[in-house]
């Protein structure tokens, strides 16, 4: 699944790639590592002419609870095979599709009792376009409107199956020619159950001690790390 992500692109790069306007107040501080379980704010592309800011962890408009974390922690991801069956997502299909720009995501490989973290990033492009859905919810206490999103996942390709060897899943990565069709609800979900080829992505191991530190938001968490205890075989 995709629970850890990064977004280090400049606003001008997002504007150029997606043909969208950028609000003057939009933050572009680099996010080198973000856990979905902290429900971070993210720059999101929709059919709107401007890039939106939303929080990761989808809160359905019908949610009546006061603590949004109750449901948001369970909706960070949506399986593309069953997204049309789930109450939180099915009414959003073909209406509230979005793209989650990413400069790379993190996943863990299981070797015995050890969890080895990897950073996965685009081979050629600077930005991944992850398929997502979004919704908006009104806080019953404050009355404020909160926009939130989820990232769709699919079966892993060959490289990701080797890395994420426990669940063998990966985020749905859209090709450039699929982006507009996705936003307009014209892309067949069955097509996206087939992941992008392994040559679309690169991966290297990163230092798990840094990911366990308090200073997660630094470039160092994404840098290659040589692990003397394990052989990673065909990953390199």
Image (cartoon, grey):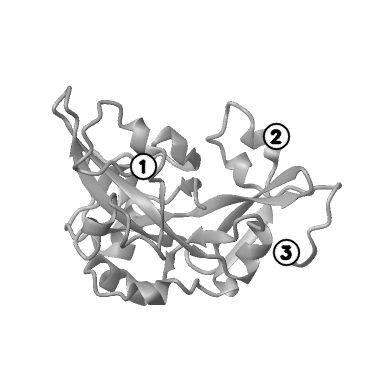
Is the Cβ of the residue at disc 3 closer than 8 Å to that at disc 2?
no
**Residue 41 placement, left or right of 138:** right
Front-most of residues 31 and 132? 132
- Report how far apart the C-alphas of labels 1 and 2 lie in the structure: 26 Å
- Residue at the left extreme? 143
**Residue visible at 48% across and 66% down in the picture:** 125
- Report how far apart the C-alphas of labels 1 and 3 lie in the structure: 31 Å
Please tell me which of labels 3 and 2 falls first in the chain.
Answer: 2
Determine whether the residue tagged by mark 2 lies in a helix, strand or loop: helix
The residue singled out by tag 2 in the image is 209
Q: Could you tell me residue 28's position as x and y percent? A: 36, 42
Q: Could you tell me residue 56's position as x and y percent? A: 36, 43
User: What is the quadrant of the C terminus in the image?
Assistant: bottom right
Is the Cβ of the residue at disc 1 closer than 8 Å to that at disc 2?
no
Residue 169 disc label? none
Q: Could you tell me residue 52's position as x and y percent? A: 24, 48
The residue singled out by tag 1 in the image is 57
Determine whether the residue tagged by mark 1 lies in a helix, strand or loop: loop
The residue singled out by tag 3 in the image is 235
């Amino acid at each position: 699944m995709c629970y850890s992500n990064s977004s280090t692109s400049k606003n001008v790069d997002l504007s150029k790639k997606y043909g969208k306007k950028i609000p003057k107040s939009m933050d572009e501080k680099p996010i080198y590592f973000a856990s979905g379980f902290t429900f971070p704010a993210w720059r999101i592309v929709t059919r709107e002419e401007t890039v939106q800011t939303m929080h990761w962890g989808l809160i359905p408009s019908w949610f009546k609870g006061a603590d949004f974390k109750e449901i948001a922690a369970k909706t960070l991801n949506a399986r593309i095979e069953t997204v049309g069956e789930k109450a939180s997502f099915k009414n959003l299909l073909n209406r509230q599709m979005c793209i989650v720009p990413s400069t790379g995501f993190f996943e863990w490989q299981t070797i015995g009792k050890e969890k080895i973290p990897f950073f996965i990033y685009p081979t050629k492009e600077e930005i991944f376009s992850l398929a997502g859905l979004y919704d908006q919810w009104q806080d019953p206490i404050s009355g404020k409107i909160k926009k939130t999103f989820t990232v769709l996942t699919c079966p892993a390709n060959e490289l990701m199956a080797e890395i994420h060897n426990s669940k063998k899943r990966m985020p749905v990565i859209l090709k450039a020619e699929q982006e507009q069709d996705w936003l307009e609800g014209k892309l067949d979900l069955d097509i996206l159950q087939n992941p992008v080829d392994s040559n679309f992505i690169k991966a290297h191991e990163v230092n798990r001690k840094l990911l366990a530190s308090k200073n997660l938001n630094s470039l160092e968490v994404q840098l290659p790390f040589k692990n003397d205890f394990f052989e990673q075989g065909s990953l390199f």
